[in-house]
Image (cartoon, grey):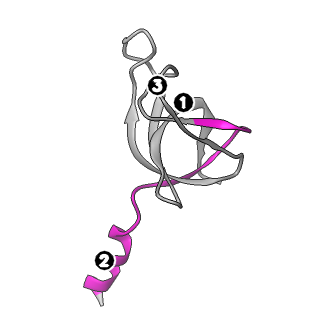
């Protein structure tokens, strides 16, 4: 029973969050000049894969500036930190 529980949780990429703004661009890299993979709609469920604390100037920030996320349809890319919300 414990092993099957672990198998189920390992299928989820990371903590769940959601898109907090309308028409959020999903970028290939953590840069607004990189290729746009998709446009995400407000309220869409996403899964966190990685967090970046580096801002556009290459400096360390006090808060997450970019999140690498995955959508339910398996699209993976980067979104600005201010566009994603976690929790309720």
Mark 2 to mark 3: distance in Å? 35 Å
8 relative position to 65: left or right: left
Crowdedness of circle 1 by 10 Å Cα count: few (<14), some, many (20+)?
A: many
Q: Which mark is residue 55?
A: none
Q: Residue furthest left?
A: 3
Label 2 or label 3, whichever comes before in sequence order = 2
Between disc 3 and disc 1, the foreground one is 3
Position of residue 13 measured from the top left corner of the image (x, y, whole percent): 39, 58
- Reading the image, the residue beneath label 3 is 34
The residues bearing labels 3 and 1 have C-alpha atoms spaced at a distance of 13 Å
Above or below 56: residue 10: below
**Pair 2/3: label in front:** 3
- The reply to whether discs 2 and 3 touch (Cβ–Cβ < 8 Å) is no
The residue that mark 1 highlights is 80
Q: Secondary structure at mark 1?
A: strand
The first of marks 2 and 1 along the sequence is 2
User: Magenta segment: does it hold 13?
Assistant: yes
Q: Is residue 2 left or right of residue 50?
A: left
Q: Is residue 17 above or below residue 63?
A: below
The quadrant in which the C terminus is found is bottom right
Tell me the magenta residue range.
Answer: 2-25
């Amino acid at each position: 029973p414990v092993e099957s529980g672990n198998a189920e949780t390992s299928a989820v990429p990371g903590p769940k969050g959601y898109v907090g703004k309308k028409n959020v661009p999903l970028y290939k890299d953590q840069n607004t000049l990189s290729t746009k993979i998709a446009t995400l709609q407000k309220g869409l469920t996403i899964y966190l894969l990685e967090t970046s604390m580096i801002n556009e100037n290459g400096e360390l920030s006090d808060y997450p500036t970019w999140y690498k996320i995955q959508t339910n349809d398996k699209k993976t890319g980067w979104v600005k930190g201010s566009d994603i919300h976690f929790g309720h």
